[in-house]
Amino acid sequence: MIAIRNRWWNSMQFAECVMQRYATKKFDTKKIPEKKVEELLDLVRYAPSALNLQPWKIKVVTDQKVKEELFAVSNNQEQITTCSHLLVFCADADYASLVKKLGALMKKNHVPDEVIGKVTGMASMFAGSMTKEQQAAWSQAQTYLALGNALNGAKSLGFDSCPMGGFDPKGYSRILDIPAHLTPVMLCPIGYAADKPAPKIRYDREDIVF
Ligand SMILES: Cc1cc2nc3c(=O)[nH]c(=O)nc-3n(C[C@H](O)[C@H](O)[C@H](O)COP(=O)(O)O)c2cc1C
């Protein structure tokens, strides 16, 4: 973890990662070492979330046959079959379980019972005040933050990625046998790019500030 921390402490390097990351359209088929993938998943783990509920789960797909099956429900986008690892970011909307799990994690981390009670009480109340649709949207919004860490994190670890929303979530749930409380939200294929980045087209700072 120290190595990861040191890397992120250097803001110049972070800026470079942000500037150099791009939505890779094709990867070469070279495999990313598992250790690097684990480091990336650690960066994902450290994403912020409301009340620290961490309402996401990531399915990591490496089997080529499975990737080929997924290709058909991903608008036939080549990233799926050429990537090294396909990360399927799923939003978890089972708030009863999320709150219980967070309470247990806090306990394990020696957080005083009084604090655990306050946090889990607040989380239960907040989640309980939402409709199922609102809960799903809340989880999905936070899953995007975890995805952001994966995209920039991949670049920082020396490989490439693509954020992908062009896929059929139901098809993914079926093929990957994803439990009902998890919704596939975004794909993040990772690997070594076999294409070149297109020029960055972005609005000026003045255009995004008002
Ligand atoms: C929510 C979302 C969905 C996207 N879906 C796809 C996709 O299905 N396929 C793809 O090639 N790129 C996809 N992209 C990538 C964008 O097209 C890309 O980020 C944008 O054009 C800017 O280019 P850059 O990321 O290379 O800077 C998606 C990006 C986001 C944030």
Image (cartoon, rainbow, N blue to C red):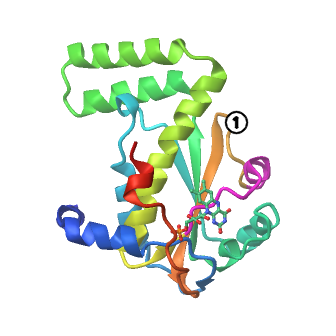
Residue at 73% across, 71% down: 77
Relative to residue 7, is residue 138 depicted above or below? above
Which residue is depicted at the point 36% across and 18% down? 120
Please say whether residue 169 is one of the residues in the magenta stretch: yes
Is 188 left, or right, of 46 in this rendering?
right
Q: Position of residue 207 (x, y in %)?
A: 44, 53
- Magenta segment boundaries in residue numbering: 162-175
Task: Determine which residue is flagged by label 1.
Answer: 180
Query: Which quarter of the rendered picture does the C terminus lie within?
Result: top left
Q: Is residue 31 placed above or below 108 in the rendered structure? A: below
Binning the other alpha carbons within 10 Å of mark 1 as few (below 14), some (14 to 19) or many (20 upward) gives few
Q: Judge from the rendering whether residue 147 lies leftward or rightward of residue 52; answer left or right.
A: right
**Residue 35 appears in the figure:** no
All told, the count of numbered labels is 1
188 and 67: which is toward the camera: 188
Question: Mark 1 falls on what kind of element?
Answer: loop
- Which residue lies at the image location 44% right of the left edge and 55% below the top edge? 148
**x and y percentages locating residue 78 in the rendered image:** 71, 76
Kind of residue at badge 1: Ala
Residue 6 visible in image: yes
Quarter of the image where one finds residue 117: top left
Is 29 colored magenta in this rendering?
Answer: no
Q: Nearer the viewer, residue 114 or 9?
A: 9
209 vs 65, nearest the viewer? 209
Q: Is residue 4 left or right of residue 100?
A: left
Q: Which image quarter is the N terminus in?
A: bottom left
Decide which of 127, 114 is in the foreground and name it.
Answer: 127
Looking at mark 1, is its residue's CB closer than 8 Å to ligand 1? no
Image height check: is 109 above or below 41? Answer: above
Point 65% across, 74% down: residue: 79
Q: Quadrant of ligand 1?
A: bottom right
